[in-house]
Each structure stands twice: as C-alpha cells, then as structure tokens.
Amino acid sequence: MRKTFRPLDGLTGGAALALAAVLALAAPGRAAETAAAPAAAVDPRDATWNSIWFDIFPQGRIGAADGLVELTAPTRAEDAALVPLTVALRLPAGDPRSFRAVTVVIDENPAPVVGRFTFGEGQRDFTLSLRARVNADSYVRAVAETSDGARHMVKSFVKAAGGCSAPASRDTRESIAHLGAIRFRVFAETGHEEAQVQIRHPNFSGLQMDEITRGYTPAWFVRAVEIRQGGKLLLAMEGGISVSEDPTFRFSYKPAPEPVTVRAEDTEGKIFTRAFPGGGS
C-alpha cells in the first residue's frame, strides 16, 4: 500500500510539476483582466469558465461548435468517478480542413483540463470516448481545433459530486501489482470500426483520503499516452487528475497490417509500452 500524505505533500520531480501545471488552470487568471469571454455570460453556470478559459486557450477566441463537434455526457452521473464522455468530430463534405486536436474541460474540477487529445494528419471524422472524474455539478466542454487554427466548443451540464476525491473502485494493491498493463481491442459494430486502449493505473488524484490514516494519497497519474501504427500517430493524450483510474480510450480506427504500439508515461516517470499485431489481438 502506498504511503499517504496531506494533499500535494510528497510530490517530487515530474509529479509535482505535472500536478502544478494542471492545478494552475483551476484558479481565475488573466482571462477577466485581458480578454472578454467567448460569449455573453447569460448562464450563471458559465462563471467559472469565463474566468479560466483564457488561461487554457491564451491563443485566442473560441467559437461555437457549428455542428462540427458533438458531446455526449450523462445528465446525472451514476458514478462521479467514472463518468462516460464521448466526443464526435465531423467535417462536412467539401470542407478542406482537418482536425488537429480536442481538449476536454470540466469547469468545476480542481484541475479543469481533463486532457488534450491530438490526432494524426488529415483527420476529418473522429470519435473519442473516455471516462472522467466530475467533482461537482459542472459543465463539461469539448473544444476542437481545426487545421485553420479555429476552435469550436460544445458543452453539456453534468450533475455529480465528489468524483475527484472518491476512493479507488479497485483494490489499490491489486491495481499496483498490474501497473502499466496495456490492453488493445478492435471493434467492428454496424460498420463503424473503433479501437480501445486501456492502461492499468490507479491514477490517484491527490484528493483521495485514506479512511484509516486520514491522510491523502499523493497524486500519481498517467500524464501522457501515445498510440501509433506503423509510425503514424493515431491518438495522443496529455492529461491530468480528472482522467479516471485505469485510463481507457475508445476511438475511431481503421485496421491496417502494421503493428500498433502504445506508450504511456506517468508522473513518477514510469514508462509503459506494448506492441500489438495490426488489427488488434
């Protein structure tokens, strides 16, 4: 069993830097001082977003989804520590652009940025599903970036409580014993092919209390994932504490004969890699 500390105590090196970076996004910053919000704040539930968005996207304004982005999220979460989210990105026929990335944000989380997901070149139609922690009633947002530099946002309000501080659903010792185990599966359902990558990791948020010691388990999570096939990028993630334990990503995938390689790195500098035959196993 891992040693417990008070929140954020005991973090060293990469873990401290990584957590500091994501937590910095939670505090109101220069947004209110230097830029107007992307849209008029007609919804009081947008208040937090209006204070943090510019710290997350200092490059410029964010527009509406324009039908290019869809976000599926439960209205009320059954389990606030395992909230399913699906982002669908689609460009209309004749649109010369492609998608570069999508950033998932949960406004009211201690570290709002769930992760930034980047794709290989020329991606025009892409679906991504993941599980996230939601700490309080909050808007969840997906902000897609197109190749022309524009950003397109969609949001969905989720009612949940305590997702970031909820205890692990698995036995911690069992989870650590299988640390870094990677699974890769391919699905072909109704003609829509997808792949799924799962990485065994407790993904401690730094906010989970040990019921016996009353201390907090230090933050320890998968901060980066890269999935490639034949050297070509399929999906990459830079993430934080809002990704659920055993990070799992399901995404659009076209089977090819080249091997699929998965590489993950956590905040303690541990690197996990595995290669799979083309098309999955």
Image (spheres, grey):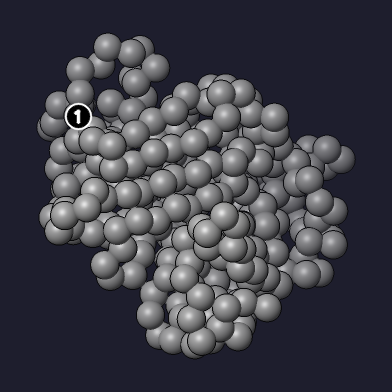
Relative side of 62 to 17, left or right: left
The N terminus sits in image quarter: bottom right
Q: Quadrant of residue 279?
A: bottom right
Position of residue 252 measured from the top left corner of the image (x, y, whole percent): 47, 61
For the point 49% across and 87% down, the residue is 258
Position of residue 47 measured from the top left corner of the image (x, y, whole percent): 33, 19
Q: Amino acid at mark 1?
A: Pro
Is residue 69 at all visible to an observer of this figure? yes
Relative side of 124 to 273, left or right: left
Mark 1 neighbour density, 10 Å: few (under 14) some (14–19) many (20 or more): some
Q: Which residue matches tag 1?
A: 38
Q: Quadrant of residue 216?
A: top right
Q: Nearer the viewer, residue 5 or 252?
A: 252
The residue tagged with tag 1: helix, strand or loop? loop
For the point 75% across and 46% down, the residue is 168
Q: Vertically, is 117 above or below 31?
A: below
For the point 42% across and 70% down, the residue is 234
Is residue 56 at all visible to an observer of this figure? no
Identify the residue at the far front of this view.
190
Q: Nearer the viewer, residue 100 or 98?
A: 98
Position of residue 213 measured from the top left corner of the image (x, y, whole percent): 82, 42
Q: Vertically, is 247 above or below 83?
A: below
Q: Nearer the viewer, residue 209 or 104?
A: 104
Relative side of 75 to 126, left or right: right
Position of residue 174 measured from the top left corner of the image (x, y, whole percent): 85, 62
